[in-house]
Amino acid sequence: MKKETEITGWDFSPLARNGRMKETPLPWDYAAIVKEYIPRAGSMLDMGTGGGEFLQTLIPLPIHTYATENYRPNIKIAEENLKPLGVQVVSGFKDEQLPFDDNFFDLVINRHEFYSPRETRRILKPGGYFITQQVKGNCDNEILELLNFNTKTEFSDWSLRAAVNELEKNNFTIILQNENTGYTAFSDIEALVSYIKVINWLVPEFTREKYKENLLIAEDTIRSEGSFKSTYDRFFVVAKKAN
C-alpha cells in the first residue's frame, strides 16, 4: 500500500516523479518564457515563491532579485533555498502594500499567486514586464464536490479574460496570452490526501478520519477509472507597463 508523501514548499515532484499525480501538459513553457526576459532585467521579483523551487530553475538571475512569500511553512524553506543565490526573501506584508519603492523592478513574475494589478504596476519601472501563470477559478472543483464543499468561492470567476481586463484597466499592454483546459489526476488515494493536506486552505481542518467516507468514494473511482481527476485549468499573460 502506498503511503502519504511529505511535500515541502510547493514542490510536488515527489508525487509527479512516480506518476502518482499527473497534470495535463501545457502548450506553453512558462519557465522558457520567463527566461527570455531575464537577460534584459537588472532587477526582478518572484511573487509568492513558495519554497523557491521554481526560481531556482531560472538561474542565472538578475543581480537584484527578490522573492515574496507569506505562507509561514514556506518562508524558512525559501530562505534556505534562495539566500545562497543572493535572493532576498521578503515576508510579513499585505498584497496591496508591497514593501518596495515605486518603479523598482524591471521584471515581476508570478506563478499561481494572488496579485494586485495596481500594486504590480506601482513597483514596475516604465516599460517593465509582468509575467504570470494563473490557475482558473474552477480549480479543484471535483475535490470540493467530493468533500461536500461549496465550489463557489470569491475566485470562481477568475479567468484569462478577467485578468486581461484588470491589467488593461491599470495601463498594461498585453504582449502574450494563452489558456488551457486540463486536470490533475491522482492514481492512488494517498497521493490525493497528500495534495489536500498541502493545499490546506482548500478544505480547512481536513483529516482522514473526518472525511473517511468521502475518500472511500474517491478510492472507488480510482479502482474503476484508474485515477481521480480534478479540474486544473491554467492561463498565462505577459504584460508591459505603459511608459
Image (tube, rainbow, N blue to C red):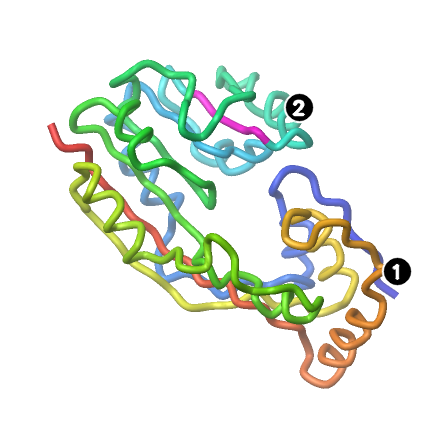
What residue did someone put label 2 on?
Answer: 76
Q: Is residue 20 left or right of residue 168?
A: right
* Residue depicted at x 69% and y 32%: 73
Q: Is residue 19 above or below residue 91?
A: below
Residue 28 in percent (x, y) is at: 35, 56
Q: Is residue 37 above or below residue 7?
A: above
* Residue 67 among those drawn in magenta: yes
* Residue depicted at x 41% and y 20%: 65
Q: Is residue 78 above or below residue 201?
A: above
| Residue closest to the far bottom | 224
Please state which of the two labelled residues, at mark 2 or mark 1, is closer to the viewer.
Answer: 1
Which of the 4 image quadrants contains residue 75?
A: top right
* Residue depicted at x 29% and y 17%: 104
**Depth order, front residue of 202/74:** 202
- Specify the amino acid type for callout 1: Glu
**Depth order, front residue of 101/153:** 153
Q: Is residue 181 left or right of residue 81?
A: left
- Count of numbered badges drawn on the protein: 2
Provide the residue span drawn in magenta.
66-70
Rendered image: mark on residue 209: 1
Residue 56 in percent (x, y) is at: 51, 32
Q: Earlier in the sequence, mark 2 or mark 1?
A: 2
- In the structure shown, which secondary structural element does the residue marked by tag 1 occupy? loop
Residue 145 in percent (x, y) is at: 64, 70
Which of the 4 image quadrants contains residue 10?
A: top right
Q: Is residue 96 left or right of residue 240?
A: right
**Dominant secondary-structure state across the stretch colored magenta:** strand
**Depth order, front residue of 11/70:** 70
* Residue depicted at x 73% and y 60%: 191
- In the structure shown, which secondary structural element does the residue marked by tag 2 occupy? helix
